[in-house]
Amino acid sequence: MKLIALSDTHLKTGAIPLQLQKFLAECDLIVHAGDFSTMEAYQSFKACGKLKAVFGNDDVPELKRLLPKRLIFEVEGSKIGLVHEGGLSLIDTTAQNYLAKEMDVDILIFGHMHRPLIEKNESMLVCPGSPTEPRMSSPSVVELIIENRIISGRIIIFDGGSCKYMKFLNALKNH
């Protein structure tokens, strides 16, 4: 089964970016770790018919009432935990590892950081970054393939929209 994990889309309308639409159409399940921002954005992802989601800190109150703060579900025998804020650091993932243990999951998908990460310890930690508002990274989502409890993942980088830090860093490399 192919999952596309994403987070922090922060869409003000229901228009899903074109480069993201292709990946969403080709997956079996969309897993959104919060911060749709608007009800229209949530409804656009939900219209794809294959969405698991939690609310994020930037979501409208209506979404915070509709969606859970945490979600645990199973795919191909693997337990997946979904939250928005898994911890406050991508450098030290101790908090995310403890949360994965607390939730008793094989994979913990979290957002809020706007930077992608795939890390395998006792559980797999996945932060898909943001396809629309990245921080210190390029726009991204994560593709997870789960077959018979075997999990593989890759970060998918999109064109455009990199944060100012990445533009600065690339400018330094070119001098």
Image (tube, rainbow, N blue to C red):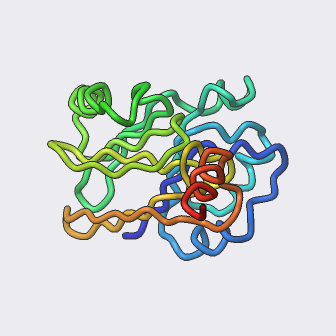
In the rendered view, does 146 fall on the left or right side of 34? left
The residue sitting at 73% across, 37% down in the picture is 37
Q: Nearer the viewer, residue 119 or 147?
A: 119
31 to 19, vertically: above or below: above
Work out which quarter of the rendered image holds the C terminus and state it: bottom right
Residue 22 position by quadrant: bottom right
Q: Nearer the viewer, residue 50 or 88?
A: 88
Q: Furthest residue to the front? A: 175
Work out which quarter of the rendered image holds the N terminus and state it: bottom left
In the rendered view, does 168 fall on the left or right side of 126? right
Q: Nearer the viewer, residue 142 or 104?
A: 142
Counting from the top left corner in percent of width and height, residue 113 is at 51, 36
Counting from the top left corner in percent of width and height, residue 167 is at 65, 53
Counting from the top left corner in percent of width and height, residue 64 is at 65, 26
Total label count?
0
The residue sitting at 21% across, 31% down in the picture is 101
Q: Furthest residue to the right? A: 13
Residue 125 position by quadrant: top left
The residue sitting at 44% across, 31% down in the picture is 70
